[in-house]
Amino acid sequence: MFGALGWILRRRRHHPHHFGYSLLALLLALGSVDASPAFRQITELVKSQSRDGDPDFAAYYKEPSKTIPDPKLNLVYIYGESLERTYFDNEAFPDLTPELGALKNEGLDFSHTQQLPGTDYTIAGMVASQCGIPLFAPFEGNASASVSSFFPQNICLGDILKNSGYQNYFVQGANLRFAGKDVFLKSHGFDHLFGSEELKSVVADPHYRNDWGFYDDTVLDEAWKKFEELSRSGQRFSLFTLTVDTHHPDGFISRTCNRKKYDFDGKTNQSFSAVSCSQENIATFINKIQSVTVV
């Protein structure tokens, strides 16, 4: 669109009074503004402030303490890519998430939550979950690799953990540079990061990859190895990991899971099959941790 606008403006210089060129240039200019990531971000921000009811962000946001007094437990934090709560509705999707659903029912489940603007894509969800604030920025969401830091004045979970004596680890199958995850994590207390580049020299099969990087079974196996290593070390640690097999539109199916196929409306659905497989891998990872120790 920007290229077309530039071409029209060059043509218009040779025909300054041509109504058609002028009208087309105006329409393209308006379209370019609408396509701008900054315009879309600002629009979302305005919408969020104009909904019914008074804005309550300032009332609820509290600057957190910088340390945890007398920390006793290690932390394992799993981001399930696009693994939304809808998938756990057994009436809508029978037997889609049995293993992870069983763990959900046994644990503390924060239900009746709502997705807010600035929290609805991966890096934004990570920022919101660790810093307590949405990610509004003057660029398209996944272009955040271009920034040099994320909210450097804010205290986020990684900062609190590091200040409390934790060594913070992050493991994922995709490239860490995508969407600036490496920048965000390094800005907030994470010193040990493992993505596709870091894992390719240590995984059993470096050629076993999907479009994003390593499959979930590989990533969670590496996370488990790291958990075992850190547990033996006796040091205080946090271990964060991010799956990717359930990334839209169709997802990817790890070769080691038992649940490789899920039928919906009488036909095999690739996306739901990826969900069923990934939740099995996540549940296996959690069960292994629970079987050996209290974190």
Image: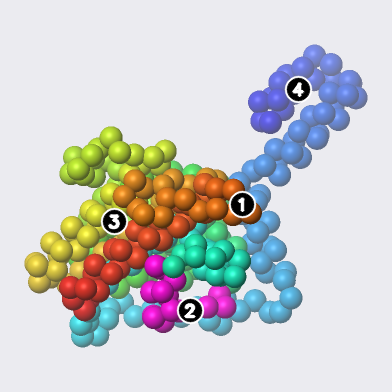
Image spot of residue 80 (x, y percent): 42, 60
Q: Colour scheme of this structure image?
A: rainbow
Q: Specify the amino acid type for callout 2.
A: Phe
The tag earlier along the polypeptide, 2 or 4, is 4
Q: Distance between the Cα atoms at labels 1 and 3?
A: 31 Å
* Residue numbers of the magenta segment: 99-113
Residue corresponding to mark 2: 110
**Left or right, 148 with reference to 11:** left
Picture residue at 15% right of the left edge, 64% below the top: 228
Dot placed on the residue nearer the N-terminal end, 2 or 1: 2
Q: Residue at x 42, y 38 (%)?
A: 211
Whether residue 13 is situated above or below residue 88 in the rendered picture: above
Q: Which residue is mark 3?
A: 220
C-alpha separation, residue under disc 4 versus residue under disc 1:
51 Å
The kind of secondary structure element at disc 3 is helix
- The numbered mark at residue 8 is 4
Whether residue 63 is situated above or below residue 221 in the rendered picture = below
Q: Quadrant of residue 220?
A: bottom left
What residue type is disc 4 on? Ile
- How far, Cα to Cα, is label 2 from label 1? 33 Å
Nearer-N-terminus badge (4/1) = 4
Crowding near the residue tagged with mark 2, few <14, some 14–19, many ≥20 C-alpha atoms within 10 Å: few
**Mark 3 or 4, nearer chain start:** 4
3D distance between C-alphas at marks 3 and 4: 52 Å
- The reply to whether the C-beta atoms of the residues labelled 3 and 4 are less than 8 Å apart is no
Going 24% across and 85% down the picture, which residue do you hit? Answer: 69
